[in-house]
Image: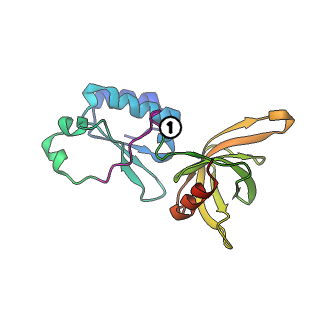
């Protein structure tokens, strides 16, 4: 069965009635508050303890299993499933349950280019950034990112995970979370180390 991202309640109803062995969620949906709530609800239901949650991307080979608390999955899974090879689990989520990687606040004035327009980095992680932009940014918008790294900029793709419109001191801007798809992690790490607060 397949459900649109706006049908989370219908999906949850089907999951609780049918108790599938695997639930697959698209990566961009899983990163939203609605997606995180669905994942947490499935994990909290004891009758769904044998249900594996897989996070996948429709446009790449990205896939990961959303881990349960230590020991929970092994005790709940049938022997045949427990013996099957599984992909490596992602790093544990932070205290809020929504972060895949630690964030680092950046010093003022660290910029990048989003579709050729300048944006200021508020905070940065290996998987994304929070930015401020005078140019319109919309959720699910695919973007090309250019990041200064020595004589040649690093270029990679991404998507706007969330966005909000602000008017501080009369100057309109967009605050957005941008997820990186194919960023060079060495470049991101160098920038974090040199520009974090």
In-front residue for pair 1/36: 36
Residue reaching furthest to the left: 79
The stretch drawn in magenta includes residue 93: yes
Q: Which color scheme did the rendering employ for the protein?
A: rainbow
Q: Position of residue 28 (x, y in %)?
A: 51, 45
Image point (62%, 66%), residue name:
154
Please state the extent of the stretch shown in magenta in the rendering: 87-98
Image point (61%, 58%), residue name:
194
Residue 62 lies left or right of residue 169; in this view the side is left
Q: Which residue is mark 1?
A: 5
Q: Main secondary structure of the magenta part?
A: loop
Q: Position of residue 131 (x, y in %)?
A: 67, 47
In which quarter of the view is residue 161 placed? top right
Image point (26%, 32%), residue name:
49
Q: Secondary structure at mark 1?
A: loop
In-front residue for pair 142/44: 44
């Amino acid at each position: 069965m397949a459900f649109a991202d706006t049908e989370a309640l219908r999906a949850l109803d089907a999951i609780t009635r049918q108790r599938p062995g695997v639930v697959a969620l698209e990566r961009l949906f899983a990163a939203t508050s609605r997606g995180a709530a669905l994942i947490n609800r499935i994990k909290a239901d004891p009758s769904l303890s044998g249900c594996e949650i897989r996070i996948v991307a429709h446009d790449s080979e990205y896939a990961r299993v959303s881990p349960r608390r230590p020991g929970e999955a092994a005790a709940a899974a049938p022997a045949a499933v427990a013996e099957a090879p599984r992909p490596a689990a992602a790093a544990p989520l932070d205290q809020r349950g929504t972060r895949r990687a630690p964030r680092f606040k950046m010093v003022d004035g660290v910029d990048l280019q989003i579709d050729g327009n300048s944006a200021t980095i508020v905070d940065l992680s290996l998987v994304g950034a929070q930015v401020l932009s005078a140019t319109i940014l919309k959720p699910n918008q695919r973007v090309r990112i250019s990041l200064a790294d020595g004589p040649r900029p690093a270029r990679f793709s991404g998507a706007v995970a969330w966005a909000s419109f602000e008017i501080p001191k009369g100057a309109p801007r967009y605050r957005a979370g941008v997820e990186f798809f194919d960023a060079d992690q060495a470049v991101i790490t160098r920038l974090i180390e040199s520009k974090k607060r």
